[in-house]
Image (tube, rainbow, N blue to C red):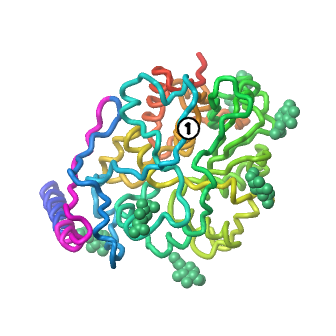
Amino acid sequence: MQKVLGIVSLTLTFCVLLYLVLWMNLSEHFYSKSFIISALILSPHGNTRLHKTEKPFHSAEREVNITPIPVLYKKNFTKLPVWDFEDVYLRDHQARKPTCPKSLQSTEDPKFKEAVLSDIQLWLYKGQLNITEWNRLAHFNNPFGFMEYNYNEVKKAVDLIPKPKSSILLPVPEGSKDGCIHCAVVGAGGILNNSKMGKEIDSHDYVFRVNGAVTQGYEEDVGNRTSVYVHTAFSLYANMLTLKKEGFHGIPQNEGIKYVMIPEGLRDFEWLQGLLQGKVANGSFKGVRPLNFFNGNFNESRFYVLHPDFLRYIRNRFMPSKQMQDTNWPLYRPTNGAFALFLAIHTCDIVDAYGFITEDHHKYSNYYYEKLKKRVIFYINHDYGLEIKTWKKLHDSGIIRLFQRH
Ligand SMILES: *[C@@H]1O[C@H](CO)[C@@H](O)[C@H](O)[C@H]1NC(C)=O
Ligand SMILES: *[C@@H]1O[C@H](CO)[C@@H](O)[C@H](O)[C@H]1NC(C)=O
Ligand SMILES: *[C@@H]1O[C@H](CO)[C@@H](O)[C@H](O)[C@H]1NC(C)=O
Ligand SMILES: *[C@@H]1O[C@H](CO)[C@@H](O)[C@H](O)[C@H]1NC(C)=O
Ligand SMILES: *[C@@H]1O[C@H](CO)[C@@H](O)[C@H](O)[C@H]1NC(C)=O
Ligand SMILES: CC(=O)N[C@H]1CO[C@H](CO)[C@@H](O)[C@@H]1O
């Protein structure tokens, strides 16, 4: 038996190598230097050390007549493939420059300072996706890129996404005394049950919420304001169906609210096309009218879609999981709450996190809005142990303040 397994795995390895060699030859006209798969080395801090080539990835000479690269398939890789341009991200020249002396961006924490890119491109919108960009992003699995997808399908959707008037999600509030943006990010953790944190949460300049952001009936514990609502197509759709009796009658509607979508996979691009054109034409949400979920409060100028580069940067530099090293690698991604928290870290100066997972999570219910205590459900596509450690570390190093109970 072992012998057979050995032969099978050898053969598989050989096939993958052969495929890569062939593919490298095919794609040589894109990259002067062929890519190298290097091992992803996780430092104890959680940062990623990646092999880098001497040459930057974008090179302007090869813009003419290029076509999308041949499709790469997740199942041809037994662990996360790491390309030499893995850790290269789009940057935003118009990124916010904090005016706040106490901004978390000016932390002395050496590990954080080394990892953070304060001008990382946050948003994906029309015109950004051309073939050069596609051929870079098609190397990364969703939601970190477009591996296995079709250029025309994704491009059709991306080219409908309105370009934000400004890269800056949240302005420094008028009349601010310290020039700082104070944000609360509220996860759904059961730790908030009976916490009486509502007033404190609402006293921030801005309140981020995510997924099933039920507030009605839980105001004392979680507050009632929402300034930024972070979601995926699935989280909107599923929470609307399942959380009605918990008081989730629709997504938050506060005046001026900003909606931020995490494009999780192809179905999100299908959803986006439906949102911006009327009805979803294909896929899991076929026939759905996404606009209905916004109860007439949808406004293109307050709608944002996160860029796959931002999501990959968060995974690579702050939340690389051991799961990326096994065959289930394509499943792993940080939770929507994690992306929301890192979005706040990149758009606010002072960030307080509530309802995020802690070491003592077994003491609390899974979600704050549950009537009966339920254990925290660990889904295979997330690494909860890593999230616990990450929030604790950010708290201990003074980057964020994490709500904990003892
Ligand atoms: C492709 O898009 C990227 C990112 O938006 C941009 O930097 C680059 O100049 C574009 N290339 C072409 C040929 O339009
Ligand atoms: C939140 O609650 C406060 C006080 O209970 C109320 O004055 C305010 O209108 C509520 N805000 C929203 C957005 O519901
Ligand atoms: C989506 O539907 C349209 C029209 O029905 C069709 O032309 C297109 O190929 C479909 N795309 C996918 C991905 O199925
Ligand atoms: C959309 O939001 C912007 C910015 O808040 C506002 O100026 C505009 O009037 C809104 N449009 C509609 C149709 O509500
Ligand atoms: C919420 O907290 C109250 C008071 O501590 C407790 O009685 C209740 O069981 C908790 N609910 C859940 C779902 O854990
Ligand atoms: C080299 C190799 O194994 N290629 C395979 C990658 O996955 C696709 C789709 O499943 C197959 O068609 C290829 O043969």
Percent x, y of residue 362 = 55, 28
User: Horizontally, is 312 left or right of 395 in the view?
Assistant: left
Please report the residue visible at 20 percent of the width from the left and 64 percent of the height from the top: 32
Residue at mark 1: 341
Q: Nearer the viewer, residue 387 or 366?
A: 387
Residue 30 among magenta residues? yes
Instruction: Name the amino acid type tagged 1.
Output: Leu
Location of ligand 5 given as a quarter of the image: top right
Percent x, y of residue 281 = 62, 76
Q: Which of 2 and 141 is in front in this view?
A: 141
Percent x, y of residue 53 = 21, 51
Question: Magenta stretch mostly in which secondary structure?
Answer: loop
Classify 382 as above or below 404: below
Asked if one can make out residue 35 in the rendered structure from this viewpoint, the answer is yes
Q: Quadrant of residue 49?
A: top left
Q: Quadrant of residue 181?
A: top right
Classify 321 as above or below 146: above
Q: In which quarter of the image is the C terminus?
A: top right
Give SS at disc 1.
helix
Q: Quadrant of the N terminus?
A: bottom left
Q: Give the range drawn in magenta.
A: 19-44
Please report the residue visible at 47 percent of the width from the left and 35 percent of the height from the top: 387
Q: Nearer the viewer, residue 172 or 350?
A: 172
